[in-house]
Image (cartoon, helix red, strand yellow):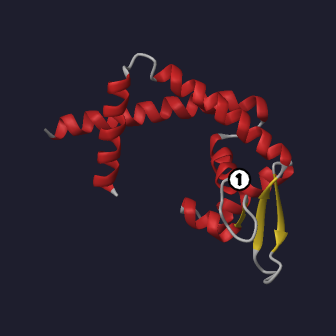
Amino acid sequence: METENFHIFELFKRINDKIEKTSNSNLKANDITLSQLKMLFTILHSEYSPEKGTMPLKELERRFGVAQSTAAGIIQRLEKKGLVESVADVEDKRIKILRTTRKGKSICESAAKSMGEMSERSLSEFTVDEKAELERLLRKLLKSIE
């Protein structure tokens, strides 16, 4: 039984690695990596007050579980590319607020479309019922390991 479980997790790893490799290859044209895109999406879809699509750097660090230096490095690269801008919080100037630029939003829209197409291709051999069952089982697995 233990070797079966290992085999399943090895399949997950291989699937994840392939998705990451394909995604990074597709994103290369926009000079962005999957890690950078994930942060860009997170900022864009943030519900932080007072303005939707903004997020404090500290909150980004917390959500990704990374050190301040790691998050700051990725954000610095995104700023150089014109995809994110940072401003000091109005109430507390020590807090750095991140905002996705128009160019960053455009990259997110393009990437979301591309990822949707990749998802459709990847699942094209599955029936509607199989897709629903796969999602149900993956959610069950996620719940059990959280």
Image quarter in which the N terminus is found = top left
Q: Which amino acid lies under the numbered mark 1 shown in the image of this protein?
A: Leu
The residue sitting at the front extreme is 128
Side of 97 relative to 16 (left or right): right
**Is label 1 in a helix, a strand or a loop?**
helix
Q: Which residue is mark 1?
A: 44
Q: Is residue 120 visible?
A: yes
Q: Quadrant of residue 23?
A: top right
Task: Provide residue 139's location: percent of width, then percent of height.
Answer: 35, 45
Q: Quadrant of residue 103?
A: top right
Q: Quadrant of residue 29?
A: top right
Side of 23 relative to 88 (left or right): left
At label 1, counting other C-alpha atoms closer than 10 Å, the crowd grade (few under 14, some 14-19, many 20 or more) is many
The residue sitting at the top extreme is 125
Side of 93 relative to 124 (left or right): right
- Total labels drawn: 1
Task: Provide residue 119's location: percent of width, then percent of height.
Answer: 52, 28
Task: Provide residue 83's location: percent of width, then percent of height.
Answer: 81, 48
Q: Residue at x 57, y 67 (%)?
A: 62
Q: Is residue 67 visible?
A: no
Task: Provide residue 78's location: percent of width, then percent of height.
Answer: 78, 50
